[in-house]
Image (tube, rainbow, N blue to C red):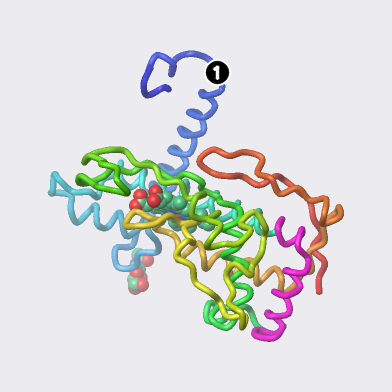
Amino acid sequence: LCSAYPVLYYLPGSHNKFFKHVTEQREFILKEIKRHQESLNLSNPQDFIDYFLIKMEKEKQNKNSEFTMENLVITISDLFGAGTETTSSTIKYGILLLLKHPEVTAKIQEEITRVIGRHRRPCMQDRNHMPYTDAVLHEIQRYIDFVPIPLPRKTTQDVEFRGYHIPKGTSVMACLTSVLYDEKEFPHPEKFDPGHFLDERGNFKKSDYFMAFSAGRRSCLGEGLARMEMFLILTNILQHFTLKPLVNPEDIDTTPVLTGLLSLPPSYELCFIPV
Ligand code: HEM
Ligand SMILES: *[C@@H]1O[C@H](CO)[C@@H](O)[C@H](O)[C@H]1NC(C)=O
């Protein structure tokens, strides 16, 4: 609305709180960049900001360079915006589903004991030997349908699709729910069931309908990282703790509290009991 009627920017209202947060985040990032500039060692870059600053320095003379201060700030806030709330809320939602389905949690813990044991930390290679855990992680993402309708995209050319003519330059928004809740691919899609990603012999079953990270060239850039984080964090927790809800598992309500761009889980309490 503010983009269409810029005068709204200047009116009082809760949107000002949002702009205040945006400004604060920008200031935080600028401060971090300054700190990096002060400690930068050209022959020993430590992280993304250092590498970007070195590129900026190298391309200082190039007027068309993409490596500008403005692009550095925007890229960092993109990584924060796209990479933190998404993964943490998916894990938070996942733990809520594990509380509601203790039989599923027990099977993951059995697999952890069998494949990893108690005496070393889980690592990424373990995932290949843990079809059940892998299936649960997929089912969590399918079931919570975290990004029901992702970012708007534009067609780069005229497209004929199922009898519809979509001209070049049309904004298109995919509906991921329609794929993640497809009844033919996932029988009883409204049920949380890791069996949706397992074959009869208990092997992991890949599905082309798993589009929690969207599809195509502009699908999630962080998919690999996000899937690693989810696997490592959840297996580390379950290796060391039994999860105990404060209410009866059947009484746990997993309806999202808010659905906008993201479908957010309700807040809840639980006990972590060392195993
Ligand atoms: C469970 C975690 C995550 C989920 C469910 C998720 C989901 C998505 C979805 C649905 C999109 C939109 C794709 C489209 O419009 O077609 C997207 C885009 C994106 N994601 Fe993620 N994401 C997650 C984690 C991350 C992480 C950890 C990062 C980076 C560290 C990240 C970076 C991005 C970026 C940069 C884009 C924009 C890609 C582009 O415009 O080309 N995401 N993500
Ligand atoms: C910069 O990094 C190089 C390579 O690690 C190191 O040898 C050098 O001492 C560092 N310089 C400073 C000023 O810290």
What's the residue at 47%, 46% (across, down)?
Answer: 81
In the rendered image, residue 115 lying in the magenta stretch gets the answer: yes
Q: In which quarter of the image is the N terminus?
A: top left
Horizontal placement of 266 versus 12: left or right? right
Identified at 59% across, 66% down, the residue is 137
Query: Magenta span: helix, strand or loop, mainly?
Result: helix
Q: Name the residue under label 1.
A: 13
Magenta residue check for 97: yes
- On the question of residue 35 being in view, the answer is no
Image vertical order of residue 15 relative to residue 92, above or below: above
Find residue 193 and report its horizontal and vertical position in percent. Answer: 66, 64
Inspect this view and state whether residue 230 appears.
yes
Q: Which of 104 and 50 is in front in this view?
A: 104
Question: Residue 258 at x, y = what percent?
Answer: 62, 38
Q: Residue at x 40, y 64 (%)?
A: 46
Give the residue at the far front of this rendering.
163
Q: In which image quadrant can residue 111 be found?
A: bottom right
Return the residue nearer the eye: 79 or 57: 79
Figure check: 50 above or below 115: above
Horizontal and vertical percent position of residue 20:
50, 29
Q: Give the range drawn in magenta.
A: 96-118
In the image shown, does 25 or 186 lie closer to the viewer? 186
